[in-house]
Image (spheres, rainbow, N blue to C red):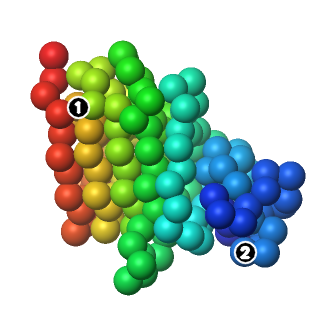
Amino acid sequence: MTTYYVSVTNGNDAQNGQTPATAKKTINAAMALANASADIVEIIDEGTYTIDADTTLNFSASNVTLVHTASELGRPVIDASAYGGSRELFQARAKTSIKLKGLEIKGGGDTGNHLFDINTLDGDGFEIEDCFIYEFVSLADGTFDAGASTPVKLIQSSFMFCPGS
């Protein structure tokens, strides 16, 4: 298990991301390193992470957590408002036990925007906790299918979806 740090304010993608002082600047750069089970990508500031229209955030392994420990200052914003058409912010096909915690995530408001690109076998252990997610048409472009021993968990989170087509 390794923790990779991200800071839009003080990070640099040329750094190794393994300490807060050597944080990556972009979420995608840190997520590319999180390729083993139980790896964590921790956002350490409350900045806005603008995701351009051609970027997808890829989970490289199962059991990876994207987290910000919410503070009284707020939470980081992952801003995918540039998305148009049929797009998903996160790609998690064939991954299980993916976790999002302490994030604000804004979509493009388009009827084709989904939070996750998954398939019907990927829901095991999926968790969203303490997140505010809006301007997506749905959580996924497929069905969250989870077994009784590893349910999908939506914990203390708010969702404001835009109308579907």
Other-residue count near label 2 (Cα within 10 Å), few / some / many at <14 / 14–19 / ≥20 = some
Residue 20 numbered tag: 2
In front of the other: 31 or 108: 108
For mark 2, give the secondary structure. helix
Location of residue 145 with respect to 34 vertically, above or below: above
Q: Pick the quarter of the image with the N terminus.
A: bottom right
User: Which residue is drawn at the image coordinates 42% and 68% (left, top)?
Assistant: 75
- Quadrant location, the C terminus: top left
Q: Which residue is mark 1?
A: 137
Q: Position of residue 94 (x, y in %)?
A: 50, 35
Visible residue check, residue 60: yes
Task: Please state the horizontal and vertical placement of residue 71, each as a whole percent of the image.
Answer: 42, 81
* Mark 1: secondary structure: loop
Front residue of this view, candidates 147 and 103: 103
Q: Amino acid at mark 1?
A: Val
Q: Nearer the viewer, residue 73 or 6?
A: 73
Instruction: Residue at 79%, 56% (x, y): give it.
Output: 12
Residue 119: name its quadrant: top left
What amino acid does circle 2 point to? Pro
Q: Is residue 107 left or right of residue 59?
A: left
Position of residue 96 in the picture relative to residue 72 (left or right): right
Label whose residue precedes the other's in the sequence (1 or 2): 2
Local crowd size for mark 1, using a 10 Å CA cut-off: few (<14), some (14–19), many (≥20):
many
The percent coordinates of residue 11 (x first, y second) are 73, 61
User: Which x, y percent locates residue 6?
Assistant: 65, 62
Real-space Cα distance between discs 1 and 2? 34 Å
Placement of 13 over or under 45, stated as above or below: above
